[in-house]
C-alpha cells in the first residue's frame, strides 16, 4: 500500500527549474531549493559549491517537521515559514503544499526581499505541484512502464 | 512516498529502520555505509546525543543500480528507539515506503521489542498506513550474544504477516545486506503494482 508515487515529468521539472531560477535572481539569493516535505530533493537553482544537497534536503525536511510539531504543541496550526539567520549565510524556508521552498542567502540580500519574492513564486510553484499531483494520479491509472518491470530485472539489481 | 523523476531519471524511495533502543538500527546503517563504494552513497548524517544514542534520525542515501534506465536510490533512515522520542518517530515515518524492524534478541529486551512493534503499528495507523500492507522485514539482531531467545520463539512473538525474517549480527555485518535487499526488493515490487 505505497501511496501513489509522485511522478515528475521532464516538462514539469523544467517549469520548476525556471521558477526557481527566476526567484534566485529576483531575491538575490545564493541558492534556491524545492524539497519534498519528506526530505526528497526535487530541484534547485544557484551556487551549491560543494554542498551536499541530499543531506541538506533531508535535514531541512526534519527541521520543518520538528518545528511544525512544536507549533501544534503550543496550539498553533503550523509555522508556515522558518528562518535561520547566521552571520554570513541565512536560510528562509516556507511550506508550499507538500513541498518546502528553501532560500539560502547572504548579505547581498535581505530577509524582507526574500520573503516578498518567495511569496509570488509560491503561488506559481503551487500551480505546477497541483498539475504534478493530477498527472501522477492519471499515469497511475494508465499503467506506466513500471508495471512491465519483470522479477528478473528487480532481482538483477540485488545480485 | 516514492518519487519518480523523469528529468533526472531517478526513482527515490524511503526506508525506515524501526525498533527498540540499543537494538542496532544505527549499527545497521553504519555497516552499510562503511561497506559501500563511495560513488554509490552520500553522507551518513547522524543526529545523536553525546552518548551516541539517536536523537532525531540517522540518514544516508544509497544507489542500488539502474532499472530500465532509472537510477534506483534509497533513502535510509533510522528512528530513535528510546520510548520518550515518540514524537520524532512519527515524523520520520512520514512518506515511508518500506520498514525494517530491528529486534534485539536478548531475553531481557523481549518486552521492549513487543512494545516497540505495537508503537510502530500505532504510529503507522496514525499516518494512514497499515503494517499488513507495507513492505516490511523483520531482523533478529545480536545473535552473537549468549542470552538470546530462540528464533522460533521470537518469530511466534514478533512476526506479523509472514514477512521475511533475518538473523543478524549487525556489529559484524552479518545479515545486514540480506535485510536491506529484502525490503528494497519488496518496495520495487510494490511500485510495479501501483505504477
Ligand atoms: N553484540 C552485539 N552488539 C551489537 C550488535 N548490533 C549492535 N550492537 C551494539 O549495540 C549498541 C547499540 O546499537 P545502536 O545501533 O546504537 O542501537 P540503536 O538501535 O540505533 O539505538 P537507539 O539509537 O537508541 O534507538 C552499540 O553498542 C552496538 O555496537 C550485535 O549484533 N551484536
Ligand atoms: Mg540509533
Image: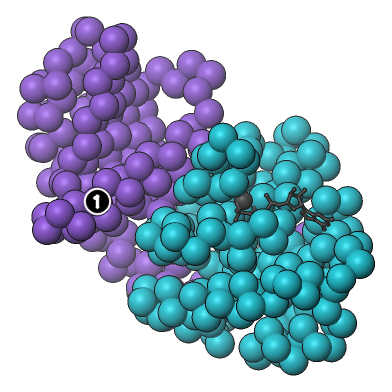
Query: Whole-percent x and y of residue B109?
Result: 70, 71
Image-based side of A126 in relation to A64, left or right: left
**Rendered position, B51 above or below A96:** above
Q: Quadrant of residue B169?
A: bottom right
Per the rendering, the colour in which chain A appears is purple
Residue at figure coordinates x 61%, y 59% from the top left: B21
Q: Is mark 1 within 8 Å of ligand 1?
A: no
Depth check: B102 or A145 in front? B102
- Say which quadrant the C terminus of chain A sits in: bottom right
Q: In what element is the residue under mark 1?
A: helix
Color encoding of the figure:
by chain
The residue at which mark 1 appears reads as A70
Residue at figure coordinates x 40%, y 46% from the top left: A62
Image-based side of A131 in relation to B92, left or right: left
**Rendered position, B155 above or below A132:** below
Q: Which chain is cyan?
A: B
Query: Whole-percent x and y of residue B43?
Result: 62, 34
Question: Which chain contains the residue that carries disc 1?
Answer: A
Amino acid at each position: 500500500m505505497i501511496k501513489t508515487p509522485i511522478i515528475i515529468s521532464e516538462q514539469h521539472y523544467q517549469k520548476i527549474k525556471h521558477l526557481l531560477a527566476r526567484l534566485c535572481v529576483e531575491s538575490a539569493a545564493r541558492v534556491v531549493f524545492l524539497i519534498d516535505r519528506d526530505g526528497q530533493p526535487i530541484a534547485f537553482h544557484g551556487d551549491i559549491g560543494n554542498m551536499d544537497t541530499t543531506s541538506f534536503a533531508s535535514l531541512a525536511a526534519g527541521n520543518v517537521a520538528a518545528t511544525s510539531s512544536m507549533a501544534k504543541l503550543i496550539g498553533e496550526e503550523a509555522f508556515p515559514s522558518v528562518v535561520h539567520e547566521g552571520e554570513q549565510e541565512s536560510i528562509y524556508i516556507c511550506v508550499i503544499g507538500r513541498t518546502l521552498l528553501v532560500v539560502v542567502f547572504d548579505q547581498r540580500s535581505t530577509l524582507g526581499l526574500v520573503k516578498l519574492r518567495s511569496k509570488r513564486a509560491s503561488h506559481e510553484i503551487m500551480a505546477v505541484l497541483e498539475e504534478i499531483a493530477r498527472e501522477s494520479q492519471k499515469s497511475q491509472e494508465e499503467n506506466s512502464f513500471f508495471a512491465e518491470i519483470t522479477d528478473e530485472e528487480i532481482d538483477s539489481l540485488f545480485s | 512516498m516514492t518519487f519518480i523523476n523523469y528529468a533526472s531519471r531517478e526513482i527515490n524511495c524511503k526506508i525506515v529502520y524501526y525498533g527498540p533502543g540499543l537494538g542496532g538500527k544505527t549499527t545497521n546503517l553504519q555497516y552499510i555505509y562503511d561497506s559501500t563504494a563511495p560513488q554509490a552513497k552520500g553522507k551518513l548524517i547522524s543526529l545523536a546525543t553525546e552518548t551516541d544514542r539517536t536523537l532525531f534520525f540517522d540518514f544516508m542515501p544509497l544507489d542500488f543500480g539502474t532499472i530500465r534506465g532509472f537510477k534506483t536510490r534509497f533513502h535510509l533512515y533510522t528512528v530513535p528507539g528510546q520510548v520518550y522520542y515518540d514524537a520524532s518517530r512519527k515524523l520520520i515515518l512520514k512518506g515511508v515506503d518500506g520498514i525494517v524492524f530491528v529486534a534485539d534478541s536478548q531475553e531481557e529486551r523481549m518486552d521492549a521489542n513487543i512494545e516497540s512493534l505495537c508503537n510502530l503499528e500505532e504510529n503507522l495507523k496514525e499516518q494512514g498506513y497499515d503494517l499488513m500492507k507495507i513492505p516490511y522485514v523483520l531482523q533478529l539482531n545480536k545473535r552473537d550474544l549468549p542470552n538470546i531467545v530462540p528464533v522460533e520463539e521470537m518469530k511466534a512473538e514478533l512476526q506479523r504477516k509472514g514477512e521475511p525474517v533475518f538473523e543478524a549480527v549487525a556489529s559484524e555485518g552479518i545479515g545486514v545486506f540480506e535485510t536491506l535487499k529484502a525490503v528494497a526488493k519488496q518496495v520495487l515490487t510494490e511500485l510495479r503494482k501501483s505504477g
